[in-house]
Amino acid sequence: MRPKALRHDKIRQWGREESAIEEACVWLRKEKTETMQAAAVKFEVSYWKLRSRYLKLHAPPHVAQKRRLLTSVQEDVLVAWMRLWSAQGTPVSRQSLRVKVKNYTGQKPSLRWIDNFKNRHPELVLRRPSPLDLKRAACFNRTAVSRHFKEFAAMIQSHGPFKTMHIYNVDEKGAQLGGGRKTTGVKYFHCRHNREKYRKRSANLELVTVIECVSADGAVLTPGFIFSGGWYDMAWFEGCSDSEHISVGKTENGWTDDFQCLKWFTESFIPQARARAGDDNEPILLVVDGHGSHVTKEMAKAGLAHNVHIFCLPPHTTHRLQPLDVGCFGLLSRKWLERCEEVIEATRENIAKGDFVREYMSVRAETMTKKVIVAAWQKTGLSPFNPDIFTEIDFAPSNATSTKAHVPLSFPQPMELDYDSEAEPTGDDHNNGDEEENGIGDALATDVLPPAPEIPLPPMYLSPNAPHPDPGLVAIDRRWTKDKQIEALSRNEEIL
């Protein structure tokens, strides 16, 4: 059963029990010779609850409700806003929740109240959130994603159809010889009396860029490696399968550039993709992000010469639209970090540059499987093609930059006013001007306006101890008074 449905079921049971306890108390006052135990058996209620209520040791629920910091209705409104804030990427912590409740009521709740509040609302949980860049939150919106799917469909129609095995995605993955600054989060045993508790790890942040490419049918092409420094040894690649298609390059800092990307594209990708296609007339589609090295003229010309078409993803949306970022690189990064820590634990040294390729290829074989790759393509909606894969919850972080209001369902919504009348106008009211064509002339001529909608404030605002509501809850106020209606009608504007 869902948490919300479970809570409603408990509320119904609680209501039946309270009514039974009240009936038992009334029966005991009438039948003075009867005992509380007999009343508990007769009305099928708890003896101890009946005793405390009959002897007035505990207040009835409607009385206790007034003594609470927030009523149940106010808590429901607060929970609705907390769920909306969580979906938008601005969740509430324990500390910020205490501040908000203080702004509403004038009294700061205790930590115990926060724990009881969380227990009363099982749909809320405390979790450590994942960081989301502000640009990614703003750019991944319904308008941009809809345009992306339309352009992808147009690409398939104009240059396709493309077989599933001929649709590829390429991206770079940075791997550090020491594993990076992050940790696995695994806990280890230490002596309780030791003041400092350490675990050795490598601080080597030397970067090696790996160019990975996967197809929509779950296949993985041979990667390319870009090392930092001025040299590399081909002996590092001994034992690697299909080493003849491995693209190897070097830059000063280990990052990719236009030349290295073009080198991988012509020396590694095109030979492998054309070999899998078999027929030179078979079109191939390569999905890339907006990095400058992926959209050069030289790369586009080389692709068209071999019937390879390049499709670029929208900016700052690769965390949801690029298969490698969605399902492959996250697992690969975790396993690579674990492998680096295993090597340090066994050898007390970090991974040498000469052993990087061998260690990386072993971790890659464990993580980048066909099942993982196919699932990643499905989550992006590219293969199989599904433009409706994302819901409103997925676009919620972009609400802050939207031109539309996004509020909970409990927030009062503006009433749509209809000024069109089905009654035919009389001769005095008839007007051949533009006002009649817009359906406004009659309203102005007769000076008859619909009554202004009376929209009550949410229960959260009705608290007598909250003269200054929290600005976070006052998201929008779209109520229209009669004066505003008259002003809008005079300007011939449409009331939304």
Image (cartoon, grey):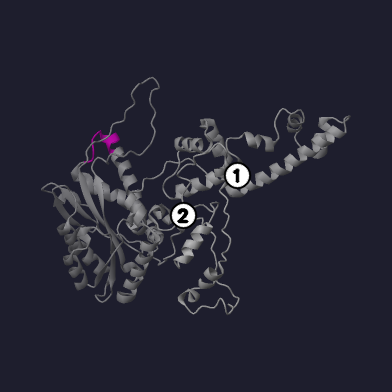
Residue 494 visible at all: no
Q: Report the amino acid beneath label 2.
A: His
Residue 486 in the image, given as x and y percentages of width and height: 50, 62
Farthest front residue in view: 428
Q: Report the amino acid beneath label 1.
A: Val
| 84 over 280 or under it: above or below | above
Farthest top residue in view: 193
The 10 Å Cα crowd at callout 2, few under 14, some 14 to 19, many 20 or more, is some
Q: CA distance from mark 2 to mark 1?
A: 21 Å
SS for dot 1: helix
Residue 198 in the image, given as x and y percentages of width and height: 32, 28
In depth, the one of 371 and 28 nearer the eye is 28
Residue topped by disc 2: 406
Q: Residue at x 84, y 33 (%)?
A: 28
Residue 321 highlighted magenta (yes or no): no
SS for dot 2: loop
Residue topped by disc 1: 73
Q: Earlier in the sequence, mark 2 or mark 1?
A: 1
In depth, the one of 367 and 494 nearer the eye is 494
Residue 222 visible at all: yes
